[in-house]
Image (tube, rainbow, N blue to C red):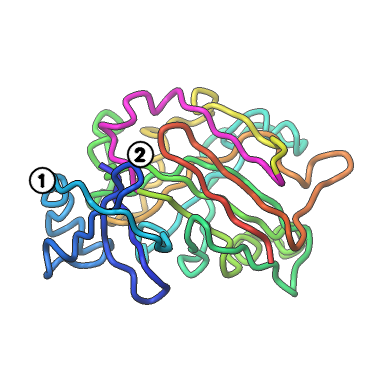
Amino acid sequence: MRLIRFGEKGAERPGLLKDDRIVDLKGIFPEIPDICERFFREGWMEKAASVDAPGEKMDVRLSHPVRRPSKIICMGKNYAEHAKEGGFDAPEQPLIFAKAPSALSGPADPIVLPASSGKIDWEVELALVIGKEGKRIDPTSAFDYIAGYTILNDVSGREAQFGDGQWFRGKSFDTFAPLGPAIVTPDEIPEIGDITLTALVNGQVMQEGNTRDLIFDIPTLLEFISRDITLFPGDIISTGTPAGVGIFRDPPVVLKAGDVVECRVAGIGALVNSCV
């Protein structure tokens, strides 16, 4: 199943993506909430999975597939080659940081280059959406807490990230978290430990990695985070980016107005965002 939110900003509706067709879940279940914490707590995942309607072709905007998570938790240096390209040692335990939920944007929405920070960079990442509340999650049951998988571009304002002494502002500018195009349920991605991630800028491949190269796998991440931070339904965990970001190239490559960034994860789809 592929859960989406579609429609203009502020008027999105929950739906299912079936090939090139959309099933309007609001039309089938008038009482259905938006895809948020309540959606997962009230069992709407299971109700949506029971729908066998073929859907219809719609020329509509896709939004980020979770309305407003309580948090977006990201991983730093979780691919050894990415740590190496930045001149860092691989971390001894997961290195976590946050992005503001207000940074979320849709899979084809523009990335707005901020006036207050230059050196804007891309980072393709596999992200997961939490499906049920969890604290001190046992790694052996970690996948029971996952509603599905999606793609996040961890857009980064490097001047702010490296100049502030902490990463939050540089990671959280508006539109710096394109997400989507859908929440893909785990049954559609049986080999989550072996899928390819690719980032292209203006059609040129800049990043290519595989989840088998994660330093800390998904069960380890969920166990580590949830020791002291309760995970709520709808929360987003982004698992890190492979080597190939712009800032560590020689010479550095940074995004400018008119550039198009495409982030692909096999089995999930792609984000295609223009910079403005």
Tell me the residue that label 2 is attached to.
223
Residue 168's place in the image compared with 215, above or below, is below
The residue at the point 35 percent across, 46 percent down is 20
Q: Nearer the viewer, residue 56 or 79?
A: 56
Q: Residue at x 25, y 66 (%)?
A: 34
Residue 150 at x, y percent in the picture: 41, 45
Q: Quadrant of the N terminus?
A: top left
Magenta stretch holds residue 185: yes
Q: Which residue is mark 1?
A: 50
Q: Residue at x 78, y 47 (%)?
A: 247
| Magenta-highlighted residues | 183-202
Residue type marked 1: Ser
**Residue situated in front as seen by the camera: 73 or 154:** 154
- Left/right placement of residue 32 relative to residue 215 reads left
Q: Residue at x 74, y 73 (%)?
A: 116
- The quarter of the picture where residue 33 lies is bottom left
Marks 1/2: CA–CA distance: 31 Å
- Residue 62 lies, in percent from the top left, at 41, 59
- At numbered mark 1, what does the secondary structure look like: helix, strand or loop? loop
- Classify residue 13 by image quadrant: bottom left
**Residue 146 figure quarter:** top left
Q: Please state which amino acid type lies under the numbered disc 2.
A: Glu
Residue 181 percent across, percent down from the top left: 42, 50
Lower position in the chain sequence, tag 1 or tag 2: 1
Q: Magenta segment: does it hold 189?
A: yes
